[in-house]
Amino acid sequence: MANPRCYSVIVFVFCCCLATHTWGQVSATKSTPVITRTITPLSDHHYDVVITITATGISGFAKYTETLPDSAQVKVTEPQNASTNKVGNQLKFIWTSFPQESIISLHYVLTLSGRFDARYKGVLRFVSDTRVTEVGLKEEGVSIGK
């Protein structure tokens, strides 16, 4: 059986090529997007997670991926016109046309059955000057849960 990550990479590269050829020039300014994450407890085991992406000049195809704790369950509440899916421990927000607002906020509710102490990763990928550009959320240790 083929690795699901392989399919994800193939689809991403295909969509980047499609975006470049179908929608014309896809570019970003020289400023690098800034990504932040805020986690607010809602109740035992439930957390409101807000990903804020500050970016200008991104147009066309883009994907933001969160690597979640293995046992996490999520409910996306504000996808900002992105298609969303969860594959394994990755939550993906995919845009065929990235929002033009300079600041967008992605919201989801994270449910954990126990404590989570680890590095919590996030990555934004988009096409810039016909090349895939990757900007990571500053990786930091996160401790949540009881």
Image (cartoon, rainbow, N blue to C red):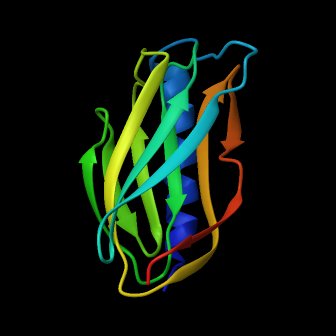
Residue 19's x, y, as percent? 49, 27
Residue 135 sits above or below residue 65 on the image: above
Please give left or right for residue 127 compared with residue 65 in the image: right
Q: Nearer the viewer, residue 135 or 51?
A: 51
Residue at 48% in and 31% down: 61
Residue sitting at the far right: 30
Residue 146 sits above or below residue 99 on the image: below
Q: Nearer the viewer, residue 84 or 66?
A: 66
Residue 143, image quadrant: bottom right
Residue 70's x, y, as percent? 48, 81
Q: Nearer the viewer, residue 95 or 101?
A: 101
Residue at 70% in and 59% down: 140
Residue at 69% in and 41% down: 134
Q: Quadrant of the C terminus?
A: bottom left
Residue 4's x, y, as percent? 49, 72
Q: Nearer the viewer, residue 55 or 119?
A: 119
